[in-house]
């Protein structure tokens, strides 16, 4: 959060102060910060500002207010407001930026969405948009993303939506309104889904006879005939040549390809599961799409994948990160994927700025790779994903996406069921399938030069974790092994795709198999008689097939503290949908009890499980129709 300062003495003292604030369980206010104030009394203001860094202006204001024991003064200056705390002219409101997430232009109506932030100590700040000198209000929404130091909110973040009809050229400026004053936001930061940016000079976005671009603190909107578009494109290419001379020719070729081929006879849909595997909802829907001759369908996959040849027998396949993939992406109408990682949206990765105005044009359809039962709004909210279609399977899941702060509406959230349900069949064998979820706290992201993408890898010391020790102990449990042999069952362990390396680290005895990617999920769900998982949504595939589920949750508190989501609407304690075991002894006892009854689910439980599903067939067709109706 804070930059390291050059003065070692002040740096050490400030580091200790911030640690005290971060560890505080109470709200640190001006009134109760006497000890902090005493420790900061002789630290110069400029040292505090340099330590924090002007990029975190709200943090500077908060700390200076603690130091002086007073709230800031607001002093109007031309088109701005100065913030003074004690004896320090700390910052201007114009140091703040507007974060532009989405720009849409349809039927002459321009809609802008983004967020603004401001120091919480200032109280409520208003927001306005000035279009050609005329100030208009925007719709404001709480983002639930305020920033804290310790228990204290020091930076407020608010989302905005603004729409205006464009009939003439327009210059748009964003305004912060505070205590009757107005200050222009000093910069527009283009976020990942904005088709306009100014990272490279000359960047622009063209649509329906209009050009949009950022010029400092202004968003410029201009009517554009073919000559103006050509001129803007040439200016951008000249800047691009200077910015990335080694990639300039390649980028221009791809841009030329787009402009030459953008008028297509049929829509192009690209399908993806994981870059290295085709074994999920996209594969099933892609197979179904071979019946639909009105769509030009392609599957994107690594050529090193063991699934590549098989997918090529089904339909058109393009190698991921190939020239063909890049061209297809630029022309695509939809990217249809079970995943929501970066390559789905932007296969160009760090070179994405060369094509920012183009690569966001396809709609992203999130097929999912399971049923969401917890609150994943922290990662899957619209500001992180921007899905055109968000597939759900149960009414409770559908409602949760609308109720929690995902910022999606009924237009984008589709209750269709997962395409792979069309191919799920029960071929039960005497197999106890163990399929835990991944653990974000035990992993880190690293760039893979060979595969040209970011990947999750295990952190050093993984084998000392409770996760590893617990599953190693379970797979080697003597009683469980003896009872499996007695009832004729065997154990099969299947690691989460992100944690495949851990499977090879788990020693297995004679009754346990380690299943790798050679066993498809469809096969695993079909063959398993009982599922032991923890928090994974694969439980729903077993429930769909009326098979029993046990949740092994020895680390529940740590999981929801360290992982990517929080507890949501789903109650694991609901024994109609599975049983919770918090220790190995209880788990082994429950598994043995199921083996004794041949892993049967009672008729009463079957009725309650059946009530989960609004549909039992036609999943692919339902998703296909929703995509055709989208946008």
Image (spheres, rainbow, N blue to C red):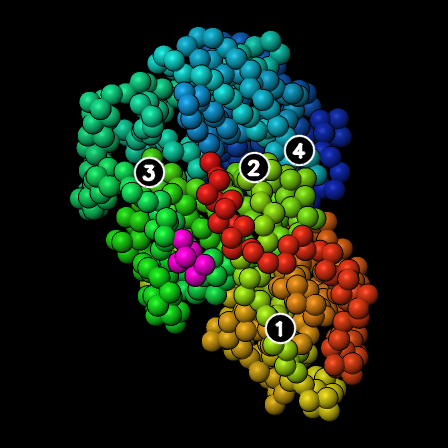
Q: Is residue 162 visible?
A: yes
**In this rendering, which labeled residue sits more in front, label 3 or label 4?**
3
* Discs 1, 4 touching: Cβ within 8 Å: no
Q: On residue 426, which mark appears?
A: 1
Q: Nearer the viewer, mark 1 or mark 4?
A: 1
| Residue at the disc numbered 4 | 153
Give the residue pinned by disc 3.
358
User: How far apart are the two marked residues, 2 and 4, measured between alpha carbons?
Assistant: 33 Å
Q: Give the CA separation, mark 3 to mark 4.
A: 38 Å
Which badge, 1 or 3, comes first in the chain's sequence? Answer: 3
3 or 2: mark nearer the eye: 2
Q: Viewer-nearest of labels 1 and 3?
A: 1
What is the span of residues highlighted in magenta in the rendered image?
A: 286-292
The tag earlier along the polypeptide, 1 or 4, is: 4
> Where is residue 62 shown, x and y percent of the image?
62, 28
Mark 2 or mark 1, earlier in chain: 2
Q: Mark 2 or 4, which is nearer the eye?
A: 2
Q: Residue at x 19, y 30 (%)?
A: 234
Q: Dot 4 surroundings within 10 Å: few (below 14), some, or many (20 or more)?
A: some
The secondary structure type at the circle numbered 3 is: helix
Note whether 253 is above or below 427 in the view shown.
Answer: above
- Tell me residue 21's x, y (percent): 67, 39
Instruction: Determine which residue is flagged by label 2.
Output: 411
Q: Nearer the viewer, residue 177 or 586?
A: 586
Other residues around mark 1 within 10 Å, as few (<14) / some (14–19) / many (≥20): some
Q: Are marks 1 and 3 in contact (CB under 8 Å)?
A: no
Q: Separation of disc 1 and disc 4 at Cα?
A: 51 Å
Q: Earlier in the sequence, mark 2 or mark 4?
A: 4
Q: Is residue 39 left or right of residue 621?
A: right
Q: Residue at x 37, y 31 (%)?
A: 196
């Amino acid at each position: 959060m804070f930059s390291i300062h050059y003065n070692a003495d002040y740096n050490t003292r400030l580091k200790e102060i911030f640690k005290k604030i971060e560890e505080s369980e109470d709200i640190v206010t001006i009134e109760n910060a006497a000890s902090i104030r005493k420790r900061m009394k002789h630290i110069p203001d400029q040292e505090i500002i340099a330590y924090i860094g002007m990029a975190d202006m709200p943090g500077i204001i908060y700390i200076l207010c603690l130091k002086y024991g007073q709230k800031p003064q607001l002093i109007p200056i031309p088109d701005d407001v100065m913030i003074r705390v004690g004896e320090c002219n700390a910052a201007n409101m114009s140091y703040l930026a507007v974060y532009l997430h989405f720009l849409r232009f349809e039927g002459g109506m321009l809609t802008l969405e983004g967020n603004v932030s401001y120091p919480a100590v200032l109280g409520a700040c208003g927001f306005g948009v000035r279009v050609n000198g005329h100030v208009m209000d925007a719709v404001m929404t709480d983002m639930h993303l305020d920033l804290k130091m310790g228990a204290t909110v020091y930076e407020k973040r608010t989302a905005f939506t603004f729409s205006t009809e464009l009939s003439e050229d327009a210059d748009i400026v964003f305004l912060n309104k505070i205590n009757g004053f107005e200050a222009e936001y000093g910069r527009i930061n283009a976020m990942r889904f904005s088709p306009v940016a100014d990272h490279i000079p000359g960047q622009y976005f063209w649509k329906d006879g209009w050009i949009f671009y950022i010029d400092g603190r202004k968003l410029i909107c201009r009517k554009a005939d073919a000559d103006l578009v050509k001129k803007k494109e040439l200016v951008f290419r000249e800047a691009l040549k200077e910015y990335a001379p080694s990639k300039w020719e390649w980028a221009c070729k791809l841009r030329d390809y787009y402009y030459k081929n953008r008028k297509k006879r049929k829509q192009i849909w690209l399908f993806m599961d994981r870059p290295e595997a085709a074994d999920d909802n996209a594969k099933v829907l892609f197979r179904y799409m071979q019946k639909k001759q009105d769509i030009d369908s392609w599957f994107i996959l690594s050529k090193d994948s063991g699934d590549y040849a098989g997918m090529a027998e089904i339909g058109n396949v393009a190698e991921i990160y190939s020239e063909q993939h890049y061209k297809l992406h630029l022309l695509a109408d939809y990217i249809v994927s079970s995943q929501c990682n970066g390559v789905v949206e932007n296969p160009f990765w760090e070179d994405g700025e060369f094509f920012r105005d183009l690569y966001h044009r396809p709609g992203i359809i999130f097929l999912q790779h399971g049923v969401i039962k917890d609150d994943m709004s922290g990662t899957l909210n619209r500001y992180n994903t921007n899905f055109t279609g968000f597939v759900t399977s149960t009414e409770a899941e559908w409602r949760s996406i609308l109720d929690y702060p995902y910022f999606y509406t009924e237009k984008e959230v589709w209750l269709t069921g997962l395409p792979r349900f069309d191919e799920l069949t029960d071929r039960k064998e005497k197999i106890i399938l163990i399929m835990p979820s991944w653990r974000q706290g035990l992993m880190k992201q690293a760039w893979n030069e060979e595969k040209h993408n970011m990947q999750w890898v295990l952190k050093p010391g993984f084998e000392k974790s409770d996760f590893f020790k617990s599953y190693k102990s379970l797979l080697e449990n003597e009683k469980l092994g003896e009872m499996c042999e007695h009832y004729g069952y065997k154990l099969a362990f299947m690691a989460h795709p992100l944690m495949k390396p851990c499977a090879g680290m788990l020693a297995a005895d004679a009754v346990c198999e380690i299943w790798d990617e050679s066993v498809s999920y469809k096969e695993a769900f079909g063959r398993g008689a009982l599922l032991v998982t923890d928090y994974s949504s694969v439980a729903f595939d077993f429930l769909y097939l009326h098979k029993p589920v046990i949740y092994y949750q020895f680390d529940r508190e740590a999981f929801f503290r360290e992982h990517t989501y929080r507890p949501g609407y789903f109650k694991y304690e609901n024994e109609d949908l599975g049983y919770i075991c918090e220790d190995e002894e209880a788990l082994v006892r429950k598994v043995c009890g199921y083996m004794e009854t041949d892993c049967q689910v009672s008729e009463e439980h079957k009725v309650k499980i059946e009530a989960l599903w609004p549909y039992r067939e036609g999943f692919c067709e339902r998703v296909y129709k929703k995509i055709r109706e989208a946008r």
